[in-house]
Image (cartoon, helix red, strand yellow):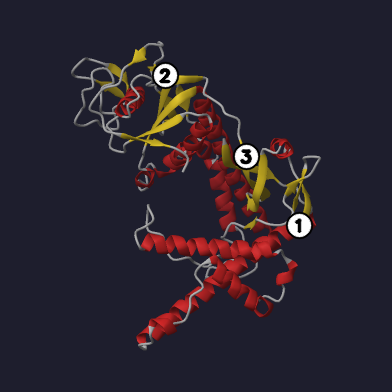
Amino acid sequence: MKVTQAYRYALDPTTEQAEGLASHCGAARFAFNWGLARVRAALAQRAAEQSYGISAESLTEVPWNLYALRRAWNLAKRTDAPWWAENSKEAYSSGLGGLARALQNWSASRRGKRAGERVGFPRFKAKHRAMPSCRFTTGPLRVEADRRHVTLPRLGTIRLCESARKLARHIERGTGRILSATVRLDGRRWFVSFTCEIVRPDRSPARPDAVVALDLGVKVLAVLSTGEVINNPRHHRSALRKLRRLNKQLARRRGPRAPDGSRRNASARWHQTRAALTKTHAHVAAQRRDGLNKLTTRLASTYGTVVTEDLNVAGMLANRHLARAVADVAMGETRRQLSYKTTWNKGRLVVADRWFPSSKTCSACGAVKAKLALSERTYSCTECGLLLDRDVNAARNLAALAVDVAQSCGETENAPRDTGQDGSDRPGRAGVRPASVGGRR
């Protein structure tokens, strides 16, 4: 199976190489801002010309796509950026490419051809707020023979903090090809991400006929239909005391902004505290990413069918009492990882409808309650007398949904079975809301 996969490695650059990486990322940001200024000026000129009654054929052309932006940049780079030769041409192309995608997303969202929330018009990138990033698509992009160094255009050979043997083995066997490389400063450390075309061996789950459903929550990370409870490590909450102390310390330092809003030189201790704060945030994100990857990999490689819910995470984040806890769980990231990992392992992901009453439905008799308060953590059925943990009951309902989806698709003979904790088969129920079978988006 041929897939597009990314390999991310931490870099260990020298001081000179780190300055070169920062210069390339700054060039990408400059090209983005330069192109955005050109587009805004052309749009303003075009609007003025339309008010004068000029015909549509004679209006000023707006450099909208990547080709037009590159052509305008090549004509103006010697005057607007006389230092352009200090960096690779890929740095400027990376910034212009990001602008072209942002303009395309804004245009598609405005016309109603893009799902999700409305996308605003692109804004200028500030040096101290934008994430330094640069993408390379041409030139020397390779992993060296010792598997501890990588070579990037104009930056030369840079040492890695870890071995790149997994990617190197694919390239040596001819089952992998590097398409692009992206360098990024994340948490005061430089990372390189290789986007590759990989031929993955055909795999199958350890239990291809088994079904598992996970009910994501805040108190616990997830409850599986097998009865297993995945505890919530609460990485952000554990680091909250340290984050508060660093934020207070940062507020006492002399920062780049004066009380009246004017710019000034920040003190050395302000930069030290800001670096410590950034490092702490990066450590929390790395812990969360590591835990979710281990969980989703285990589920996708063990069970043939994984069932999850289509949760309204954006609506949950609007609740200021739950926003911090919901963000720490990263529910959307869990579903995203399951979507492609189930495909890689020849499994499938069933996504329940957003309005499917998994918590209100009895997993034994199918009775649905009209109301169920969030404070009720134990489900008590008035019809059959079932007394069960609320999250376990919801997970079992989600697991039974996979059988109903298989029956509606005409797969009754080879329908996956939900094997509970006791190993018995659990038949699905009719009358549940439909679900969507998800793949990698």
Q: CA distance from mark 1 to mark 3?
A: 25 Å
Q: CA distance from mark 2 to mark 1?
A: 51 Å
Three-letter code for the amino acid on which mark 1 is drawn? Leu
Q: Find the residue positioned furthest to the bottom.
A: 52
Compare residues 55 and 8 and report the one nearer the observer: 55
Query: Percent position (x, y) of residue 407?
Result: 31, 25
Q: Would you place residue 379 above or below residue 104 in this image?
A: above
Q: Quadrant of residue 16?
A: bottom right
Q: Which mark is residue 226?
A: 2
Contact? badges 2 and 3 (CB < 8 Å): no
Please name which of the two marks, 1 or 3, marks the residue nearer to the observer: 3
Residue that numbered label 1 is attached to: 155
Identify the element where label 1 is drawn. loop
- Mark 1 neighbour class, 10 Å CA radius: few under 14, some 14 to 19, many 20 or more: some
Q: Would you place residue 23 above or below residue 392 in this image?
A: below
Q: Would you place residue 123 above or below residue 147 in this image?
A: below
Residue that numbered label 3 is attached to: 198
